[in-house]
Image: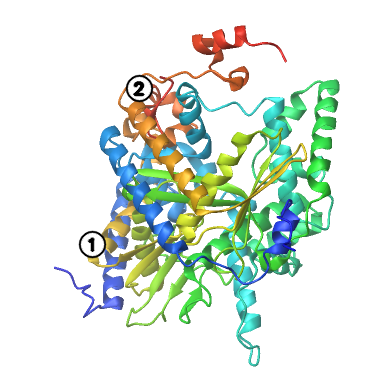
Amino acid sequence: MTSATRGGWDAVGTADRLRRRVADELGAVLAAGPVGVGRVHVGWVAARDVAGCAARYRGQGEDGWGFPGWSPATAAGAVARAALLAYLDDHERPGSGAAPPPAPLGTVRQWMRSCRDLSADGVAGWVAERRDDGDAAVLAATAAGASRWLAGFLRVMGWPLPADLGLLNAGQGTLTWRPAGVAGVSVSGGADARLGRVSGAGRFSLVVHRPAGGDDGAVEVRATFEAAAGALARGIAPEAVLVTAGDTGERLRLAVDDDVLAAGGGLVVDVVRQRVIATERGFDPADATPGAACRHCERALECPPGQAWLHGPGHARGGLPVGA
Amino acid sequence: MADPPPRTLADVLAGAVGPVAVPADDAEQIDHLRLRLDEAARAAAAVAGWTPDAPLRLTKGVVTWLLRCPRRALAPPESSGSDDVVAGLIVDAAAKVATLVPQRAATVEAAVAFLVATGDEGVADHLASLAPAARAALLADVGTRVAQLTSGWPAVEPDWWPRVEEPVRARLADGAVTVGGRVDLAFGGPPTSRPAVLVEVKGGRWYDGMRADAHLYAILVALRDGRSPSAAVTVVADGTTQVEPIRPALLAHAAERLDEAMQVAAALAVGEAPAARPGPYCDHCPVRADCPAGTSWRATKVPA
């Protein structure tokens, strides 16, 4: 039975049930494991890695599980969203008239120049530090990535942006769910924007922008995760998740229902489950799911299934036989 | 008297600032190309067994080698450690720095630092691994090329929306075949009011085969945007600039190449032995030692 029909979408009740179910499962997983799992933050990267190969995820260890820190690569989206938000704020002032589309590089650089507070939170503080250090190369690389992100986002979303679009994760903090009674676990989504007003009616969609993506199979998984993470963090389930691709110009819209949320909740629980297993027995190639990620896996040499995949007969690279 | 045709990137940007003049049948032609490529991809995928989960992934390099020498197309990825490759990467990065930070000189040092900042430390590692004399010689050579390239580099107005390494990709046959890459420099295009202009930067010497890369990107951008770019510009460190207006015939030719590359790839995927077609590129081929045809060709060629 599904309560999430489009006609009678109980966005709050659905999210509440998801919260209870995921919290119960997390509690059970942690209770069955050893003490000392520590803090576990579940975001998209962790969910993707676990879904791809649990053994590889566990093998990353503490160094791989956390946020790797700001760099031009990790800062691109955050800088682009912050710069766009600043641009929109400037141009929505009374009397400012119809705004021209923001030129990405100029908009990004203007925002980066405004970053002077070394103690600022998030990416703004990091940019301020780089400016203070006079790190021209890192600033140029960051501007390149952010302007690329912004151009792709505007190309897919169009200009003017939809009137009901609101940017998320643009320097205002990230909504995080900390399930009651489950110590040490937190969950947050990485959606870049929302379409529609977030209210109990649940008539809003989350937007995830991918500047480029070689792994099209992960798009639906991403949408599934963001649906659940968004519902858990807001206590209101979105009616859809829209994934936009800057490189192809495509949009994938995933309508959210109970099944999608259950699958997304399962991704969240799986991350915590793998962290429990990591505490018990660490990297174990018996749980490997060999695939293209083996080429970049730091544990590949100690993973017989991965080695078999990498050197197996008939193994293809990008659809072509290797070294024929 | 008619204006002379544009010969440089600056000419192209200066001459294309008006409203976008899109031919009336542009969208129709692009739809036609999309259908044609999709059909070709489905036919090739039916032979090779590619699926959206295990697709054929084509890039400009793979397309080039499938058509030029299928044996080379199946070779392991080229090492990024040769002087030639490193020089090309530095020149390429210098053009990007010149576009991103026009107020500063795009020097070799700035280009190498930019590469490191983007996570590519291979160039810096290669330079560090060289003996001082070899490093000095390489840096002098690259410095000349960078100076040649950037001396006439235009200051790009913000309204052109300059982008570096712009990703572009086409999914064909529902994703069973993808064709993708990164345009070195892209300007204009939707949603700006200006036409799209694509720039490919090459670090070596001009040869006619270079044009194919820009043509491939032109068709990918046309498929993505639903609007043809107005020009593809190949800028080479030897001072050559090739400006090509994007005409329907050029896009059709690029589609023919893609079609043929997919057919070759499908044959290879089902076990056909890759043909070796020797040529001047054999000197730098990573599998030259194991290639009788290439070895024979290299033995018989007349030294330059």
Number of marks in picture: 2
Q: Which amino acid lies under the numbered mark 2 shown in the image of this protein?
A: Gly
Look at the picture and state if B65 lies above or below B189.
above
Name the image quarter holding residue B242.
top right
Q: Viewed as shown, does residue A211 lie left or right of B40?
A: right
Element assignment for label 2? loop
Residue at image position (28%, 60%) is A24
Position of residue B285 measured from the top left corner of the image (x, y, whole percent) = 57, 20
* Residue, disc 1: A259
Q: In the image, which disc is placed on residue A321?
A: none
Name the image quarter holding residue B116.
top right
Between marks 1 and 2 in the image, the one whose residue lies nearer the viewer: 2
For the question of whether residue A217 can be seen, the reply is no
* Residue, disc 2: A312
Looking at this view, name the residue that lies furthest to the left: A1
Residue at image position (48%, 65%) is A156
Look at the picture and state if B224 lies above or below A81.
above
Query: Which of the chains bears the disc numbered 1?
Result: A
Q: Which amino acid lies under the numbered mark 1 shown in the image of this protein?
A: Asp
Name the image quarter holding residue B266.
top left
Residue at image position (47%, 50%) is B169
Structural crowding at the residue carrying mark 2, measured as other residues with C-alpha within 10 Å and reported as few (<14), some (14–19) or many (≥20): few
Position of residue B34 measured from the top left corner of the image (x, y, whole percent) = 38, 53
First in residue order: circle 1 vs circle 2 = 1
Position of residue B216 measured from the top left corner of the image (x, y, whole percent) = 52, 45
Image quadrant in which the N terminus of chain A is located: bottom left
